């Protein structure tokens, strides 16, 4: 069977973009078991409570929920197990240095297949305050209102 091409999105963490300012993003591979891959191919995963941490020169993904594979046997995986991320050594050093700064964390933004390989997009993030969230919502609503006005004007002509 030929390997699929392009990017196939499995899960996205929209809440992360609402709760955090994303400073930079990285694409990382995942170390997965067979039943995890099969469950992901069914499009089942949740990144909501997930985060990544650098420990002893390796990056680990915590609290990402990949449910058990329905046709799995006794070899099925633990849904919220800690998974290793595959990054280059210099990327790990940069992430480690950034997370030692106060207030920065690593959050998963998207989980997808790229050319047949499971990948996760992680972002270095700084938490937003509640007034920042309100400001983001106000900006989004103002943009939506402006787009509606432009569309309405185009229909009137």
Image: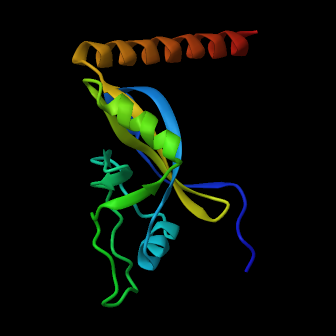
**Can see residue 15?**
no
Residue placed most toward the observer, 83 or 149: 83
Residue at (70, 55) in percent of width and height:
6
Q: What residue is rendered at 38% in x and 13% in y?
A: 138
Q: Quadrant of residue 8?
A: bottom right
Q: Residue 64, how many percent across, how many down? A: 32, 56
Is the N terminus in the top left, top right, bottom left or bottom right quadrant?
Answer: bottom right
Nearest the camera: 101 or 45?
Answer: 101
In which quadrant will I find the C terminus?
top right
Corner quadrant of residue 45 = bottom left
Q: Is residue 130 left or right of residue 136?
A: left
Position above or below: 106 against 104? below
Camera-side residue: 121 or 150?
A: 121
In the visual, does 142 lie left or right of 82? right
Q: Where residue 102 sits in the image (x, y, percent)?
A: 25, 23
Q: In this view, does 137 lie to the left or right of 34?
A: left
Q: Residue at x 36, y 37 (%)?
A: 96
User: Looking at the picture, does residue 35 appear above or below residue 91?
Assistant: below
Residue occupying the far bottom of the picture = 73
Image height check: is 93 above or below 82? Answer: above
Residue 115: x percent and y percent?
A: 67, 60
What colouring does the structure picture have?
rainbow
Residue depicted at 44% across the width and 43% down the height: 92
In the image, 103 versus 73, the foreground residue is 103
Total marks placed: 0
34 relative to 32, above or below: below
Residue 60 drawn at (x, y percent): 34, 53
User: To which quarter of the image does residue 32 belong?
Assistant: bottom left
Q: Is residue 2 visible?
A: yes
């Amino acid at each position: 069977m030929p390997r699929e091409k392009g990017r196939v999105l499995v899960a996205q963490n929209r809440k992360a973009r609402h709760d955090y300012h994303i400073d930079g993003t990285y694409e990382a591979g995942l170390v997965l078991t067979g039943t995890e891959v099969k469950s992901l191919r069914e499009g089942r995963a949740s990144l909501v409570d997930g985060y990544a941490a650098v420990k002893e020169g390796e990056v680990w993904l915590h609290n990402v929920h990949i449910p058990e594979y329905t046709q799995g046997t006794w070899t099925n995986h633990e849904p919220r197990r800690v998974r290793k991320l595959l990054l280059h050594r210099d990327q790990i050093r940069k992430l480690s240095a950034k997370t030692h700064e106060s207030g920065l964390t690593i959050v998963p933004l998207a989980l997808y297949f790229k050319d047949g390989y499971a990948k996760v997009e992680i972002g270095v993030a700084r938490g937003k305050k509640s007034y920042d969230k309100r400001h983001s919502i106000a900006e989004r609503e103002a943009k939506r209102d402006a787009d509606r006005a432009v569309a309405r004007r185009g229909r009137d002509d």
